[in-house]
Image (cartoon, rainbow, N blue to C red):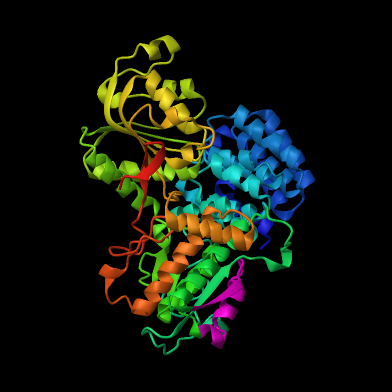
Amino acid sequence: MNGRFYWFTLIIICILWLLCPPVATAQVAADVQKQYSAAVTLVQTGDYERAKSNLNAIIQQRGPLAPYANYYYALAAFRQKNFTQARQSVRQLMEGFPNWRKMDEATYLLAAISMETGQYEEAFSQLQKIGDTALRSDVTKLEQNFLPRITDLNRLKQLNKAFPNDRNIGLALIDLIQRSASDKDDLELSDRLTNRFGVPGTATAQSTTVISGKSSADRPNQTMPTSNRNTRPKGYYNVAVMFPFRLDEFDGEKRARSNQYVYDLYDGMKMAKARLQDEGITVNLFAYDVDNDANKTLELLNNPAFSQTDLIIGPLYVEPNRIASAYASQNNILLLNPIATSSELVTNQPLSFLAQPSVNQQAKKVAELARGLNAGRKAAIYFGTSRKDSLLAAAYLNELKRQNYQVVDFRKVSGNAQAMANAMQFTGIGTTPVRSQTAVSSTTPMALSHVFFASSNDEDGSRMLDALGRRRVSGSVIATASAFNFYRNSQSTFTRRDLYLLYPDFIDTSREPVIEFEEQYVTKRNTIPSVFASEGYDMMLFFGRQLAKNGMQLRNRDSFRSDTDDYILSGFDYTQTNENQIVPIVKYEDGRFVKIN
């Protein structure tokens, strides 16, 4: 069946009511009924011009069959690929017969026309109007047929922003990011969408040989090997770093690469390798250029030499990561996700770990801090415009609800301080939303235990503090560090009220291990280490030590945490879960930020 006209199956389903519409026969003259049936037959047989001529005569009569004729006229024009005429005909039907009982079918046809002409926003807006549940499967097929044609990543991201609850758009965006993007923000977006919508085109595994959504019976050459491994501590450890290095695009003179963070992570790991060697722990790093190619990933895993791997770091893309996780689980190999924050990646994967604290883990640690402030049980939660912000805010809302807090406001805010202040609505404590500046400045003081603010815009933090001042809100503020610009914001920004910052990437530059690492890195690389270089160093140092201590078996979970103070960031804790439980929260004291948890 032609994919472009696959929705013709819907038309076949509707043939009966179109040939014999539910109109009382007394209302339709026999000759008109005969003319209508003949016109429908002409559409079915492809004689579109004659069909349109006959249908137009019925439309002009404005009788009971006019809306049905109008629909078939639009369908005939659509089959001719005369999309302008088809659109005009559907619009004429909608305007002339707004209460037509089959309007959902007309709306569906208009959406198909818009899809064909690349007007995707209009198409999805129309599809959202369809209320007939019998059409839902056809709507899904229509979306799935056209979304793969969108190859512009920004266009698809705009669609996702406009229709955030549409699963098909989300899955298409995941697929396009995984096929074409290497930017960290895009990969994080893919990670969040995967956490919400799942993985495109995959099925639930039924056995250990399920690969890429198909069983070994379907793809006999793609079963994963198993090996009899020695899981005890040994004299050396092989670490496979599966990153999208994209060596075919590498330019040594160019540092501003979209995947520069990958090279920074690896540079940090090489620094840790030298440190581990000084401690008597031999680590062999093997870098593999793994992009978003499931077949190449599988080919690598099936290489007999790969069976000697003790730790896998990566891959960063969804499908290669899924394959590698299954392989690691079958072969008793530890797998570390270096940048992801989705708990789903380690759920039911006992040998897979997150180097970063998950969004849920961050929410829990912030709630622990709030509980320790002992300032009551009323709170407000605000968040910025990015999906990352809203996910964290939603996770924190759920955490506060579990702890029986009264959340008096939960809202997305943006713009300047006045706009943020105007948006605040403390409905939980009986205040009326205020819009004018005069009213805001004279509002009765609002006493809250704390306000939580999640934003990825480094200009939003100071604006939020100003907005809270304008609304005379008292109470502590807990915000993401990413909401502030530490180079532009003055010291008073961080001292004018009780402010705490959620700061997973916090590095205390006054500590001796940090100073030494930066000096060594500058000497070797002639540049200041990025936070990714520091993270690469820490994760390799920690897991290298764990391999030397425990081998590949987690016999003593209580010791699976960093017990020394020589890490650049804040260390690791996996004693309770495979997500890193270390979530730094800092406060500005005596001219610098210090960890308070």
Residue furthest to the top: 438
Between 466 and 569, which is closer to the camera in this rendering? Answer: 569
Residue at 62% x, 38% y is 122
Between 251 and 42, which is closer to the camera in this rendering? Answer: 251
Residue at 58% x, 79% y is 300
User: What is the magenta range?
Assistant: 283-307
Q: Is residue 86 above or below residue 516?
A: above
State whether residue 262 appears in this view.
yes
| Position of residue 415 measured from the top left corner of the image (x, y, whole percent) | 52, 27
| Position of residue 497 measured from the top left corner of the image (x, y, whole percent) | 35, 28
Report how many numbered discs are placed on residues in the image.
Answer: 0
Between 383 and 99, which is closer to the camera in this rendering? Answer: 383
Residue furthest to the right: 49
Instruction: Tell me, yes or no, whether the highlighted magenta stretch contains residue 450.
Output: no
Q: Quadrant of the N terminus?
A: bottom right
Q: Is residue 406 above or below residue 243?
A: above
| Position of residue 106 measured from the top left corner of the image (x, y, whole percent) | 59, 40
Residue at 62% x, 28% y is 95
Q: Quadrant of residue 126?
A: top right
Instruction: Tell me, yes or no, whether the highlighted magenta stretch contains residue 303.
Output: yes
Between 263 and 521, which is closer to the camera in this rendering? Answer: 521
Q: Is residue 374 above or below residue 51?
A: above
Q: Quadrant of residue 454?
A: top left
User: Is residue 18 toward the left or the right of residue 35 in the image?
Assistant: left
State whether residue 10 appears in this view.
no
| Position of residue 334 measured from the top left corner of the image (x, y, whole percent) | 42, 74
User: Is residue 377 toward the left or the right of residue 496 in the image?
Assistant: left
Q: Quadrant of residue 439?
A: top left
